Image (tube, rainbow, N blue to C red):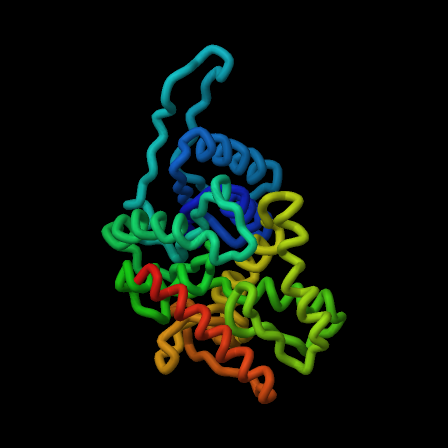
Amino acid sequence: MKIGIIGIGNVGSTVAYTLILENLVDELVLIDRNPDKLNAEIIEMQDAAQSLSRHVQIRPGPVIRDPLRDSGDLHIENDYSALADADFVIFSAADLSIIKMADRLGELPITGKIAEDVAPKLKASGFSGILLSISNPCDVITQYLWQLTGFPSNKVIGSGAVLDTSRLKNRTGREDVLIVGEHGESQTAVGNVDDALANQARLTGWNVFTVKNYTNFGIGASVAKIIRTIISDSGEELPVSTYDEEAGAYYSTWAKLSRDGLVYRRLPELTEKERANLDTSIARIKEFYSKIS
């Protein structure tokens, strides 16, 4: 299994390590705008894979030097052409250092520009696998990448509400609950969930972010779950973000995935309140998508 990851920050590096740890990848292609960070993460992942007895090829090869004596630019370059035969490419690029957020949509101006830079390079590489977008705002950026690359919509998927649903299950102590709609402030809890508990689930990520300035373990595990479900052909439905032609938007609901991408998507049974909340969530996604499209 060959997987590319674009953006090796706190999230991208955790995703890469989780894939190695769970033995879900044979070859990793890592891409990042910061060559020093990219080089350091490649070295660490190679060492981790060796200790874990995982035979993972990681590209590009690292540069080893004496950092106390050697100066100057690292000669390590991003190689988009290596993504041509990848099974998955994970888009995790972002820049949170200059963002003051109270909402994931606050990332849109910067992440949108990064997507505009990456998309033509990814398209030119000849990549034809599944593009999994995990950068925020997830639903808007997933749709923007679909538009920019021209890839089939069934092969452009957002991680969506997989993590949000895990958070809701933890807050409620129930397994029969679900998040649909936006991976964000308008997320919609399904399953007759108490409003206070639904709000706690929504705030879970912010409790982590406001202390660490990022979240990483939850999304790393969520990505591994998505990829494991696809390659095992288990038939399990996941609440990922996929394109609804009728609504003209990406948002999360139950979806069955295969190695060819989306097989089908379906809405769960909704109460009148849940349906109204979902409609509001979809409208919010479309509003912000219109700002960049």
Outermost residue toward the right in this view: 173
* Vertical relation: 47 (above or below) 103: above
Which residue is at a point 57% across and 53% down the rendered structure image?
A: 220
* Vertical relation: 175 (above or below) 212: below
Q: Is residue 205 left or right of residue 144?
A: right
Considering the image in quadrants, where does the N terminus appear? bottom left
Which residue is at a point 44% across and 29% down the rendered structure image?
A: 36
Q: Position of residue 94 (x, y in %)?
A: 45, 47
Q: Position of residue 136 (x, y in %)?
A: 47, 56
Which residue is at a point 69% across and 69% down the rendered structure image?
A: 169
Q: Is residue 215 left or right of residue 255?
A: right
Nearest the eye: 243 or 226: 243
Question: Which image quadrant is residue 128 in?
Answer: bottom left
Considering the image in quadrants, where does the C terminus appear? bottom left
Outermost residue toward the left in this view: 124
Q: Is residue 183 left or right of residue 166?
A: left
Q: Is residue 2 left or right of residue 224?
A: left
Outermost residue toward the top in this view: 69
Is any part of residue 190 visible from this angle?
yes
Question: Which image quadrant is residue 78 in?
Answer: top left
Which residue is at a point 56% across and 62% down the rendered structure image?
A: 225
Q: Position of residue 206 (x, y in %)?
A: 63, 54
* Vertical relation: 30 (above or below) 176: above
Number of numbered discs? 0
Nearest the eye: 216 or 65: 216
Is any part of residue 258 visible from this angle?
no
Q: Position of residue 31 (x, y in %)?
A: 39, 42
